[in-house]
Image (spheres, rainbow, N blue to C red):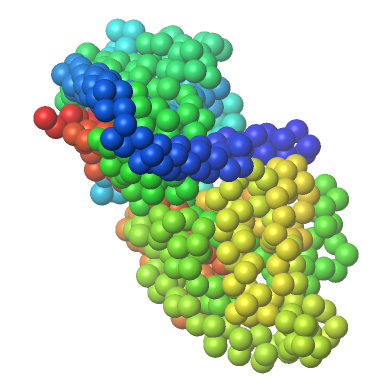
Amino acid sequence: MKKRMKTVIALFCMTAILSGCSSSGDSGTTIAKQNDKAAQGQSTENQSTEGKNSGSQGNDSQESAIQSSESQGTENKNMEAGEITVGFSNDTDSWDPCTGFGYTGSPLYSTLVKINGDNKLENDLATDYQMSEDGLTWTFKIRDGVKFTNGEELNASDVAFTFNTTKEKATYVDLTMLDSCTAVDDHTVEFKLNKPCVTFIYTVAGAGIVPEDSYTDNFGMEPIGSGPYKLTQWDKGQQFIFEVNEDYYGEQPEIKKAVFLVQEEDARFVAAQSGDVDIALTSATLATTQIDGMQVESVDSVDNRGITMPTVPDEGKVTEDGYKIGNDVTSDIAVRKAMSYGIDREKIISEALNGFANPAYSECDGLPWWNEEDKIDTDIDYAVKGLEDAGWIDTDNDGVREKDGLKAEFNLMYFAGDSMRQAVAMSVANQAKENLGIAINVEGVSADDTVKRMFSEPMIMGWGSDSPMTSYMLFHSSNAGKTDFYNPEFFTNETVDKYLDTAMNSKTFEESLEWWKKAQWDGTTGTSMRGEAPWAFYVNMSHLYYVKDGLDIGKQRIHAHGAAWPLIANLAEWKWNS
């Protein structure tokens, strides 16, 4: 179990890295302040020397013009060559999709189906697919004439090998529902499931296909795919380079070469200012700074931030690992409802995120399985009335409510070093005290300590994916209390379980939508803040990028958790506009 826990922590930390969180803890504020001071100092200096050293000023202007020309020349050179340079947040330990790489889409690999810019499924390698009446057999027809970048032909046996290998490795990709995958012939592959799983198609969409004959233990270091690009250079921790796959079966990309510089946030910001990159990941802290020749593009996401709240009281119970279970304050639904209705999301966005976020109401806002009735308005009066009706009264006038001698007070954890989560937590805590009379102690905590405490203490959590499977994992009772971060609240609800199971067992994805939505809110109960409120969802992060004028990054689908890899999933659609 300890080994499993460490694996989960590592994966969760990887996800945090993908979302572009700064390890320094200031998310670029230091460099921003330095640049502001430098600009102010330059302004003062120019004013004090105005009219004195005109010759020197002339030289400075000439030098500035030369630098501007050089920067413009670099931009034009990349544009003319169909190349880009990207200030990226991280590379990877392995490029192997059988161990989880590229689950949000990768230009190195083909998948049977893929998710397009409209967040809809479309065929990629598959020309057609069908599911049997009992939901246990999926059959895919595969296009002809596809080659891997090493020249080998891709056929059904490669697809079967990919999924069977991924299941055997049992790492990040969940294939517990898969019994077997078999190549019926060169262009037909058949999946046998041990239980109906309507979300299986989304698992398929995240699985890049590898070549059976060339797959080795070292594959993750020397990847071979059939996507629009191939990896031609990798200097781990420094840069990696994609170049166009000339044998790609689809339309040839306009961007022929992409250089990804692995940089900390401050370095990406400086590189954008100096014109050394054509696009750079940035954050809400820095994105208010204007950079000549670049604009900030904001992409909507379901990369949410909210707080998990233990739904069971402290009865002295512990998990199988010995971690305390339950919280006597948040186990009261009146408190959870108050934390849902009594916090102004727009104020969090303004105070903590410089306006670069959208209000969040669930784990799946805007996706096809989202129930729009999840949306709630800030209603402090409703929240306060609920608290008082439940017996939470400030009898000693210290600003904090109490009930039967118990203070309405709890700790709120966030991952230490994550300044965005810290900022959200502080805004929530300030509003809770002012609006609701609930005292929240904000605390930065290590990943190890989080696992030990998350079953008994609220924490700032982030999720968001392209698949409704996330909803199942977050709220089905079978996942309660595991160390995988999905349901540390110990949320259980028989009605919700029934809806989630019905959704999973649906004959078609369209049929399942009704049940995913009912699980969130059926008019009486559900996982949403209108219902049992095990989560208080607050914001969906905007994924932010400095983009050079003239660079078109295509139609970005709603991003999952993480700002880096989802950005380049559609790299083949990028282009320079003259």
The residue furthest right is: 316
* Quadrant in the rendering for residue 170: top right
Tell me the quarter of the image containing the C terminus.
Answer: top left
Residue 17, given in percent of the width and then of the height, sits at 55, 36
Residue drawn at (45%, 49%) of the image: 284
Picture layout, residue 43 above or below residue 90: below
Residue drawn at (28%, 42%) of the image: 295
Answer whether residue 459 is visible to the viewer in this image.
yes
Tell me the quarter of the image containing the N terminus.
Answer: top right
The residue furthest front is: 52
Residue drawn at (33%, 43%) of the image: 290
* Quadrant in the rendering for residue 192: top left
Residue 67, given in percent of the width and then of the height, sits at 28, 21
Picture layout, residue 397 above or below residue 571: below
Residue 82, given in percent of the width and then of the height, sits at 20, 20
Judging depth in this view, the residue of 272 and 162 nearest the camera is: 272
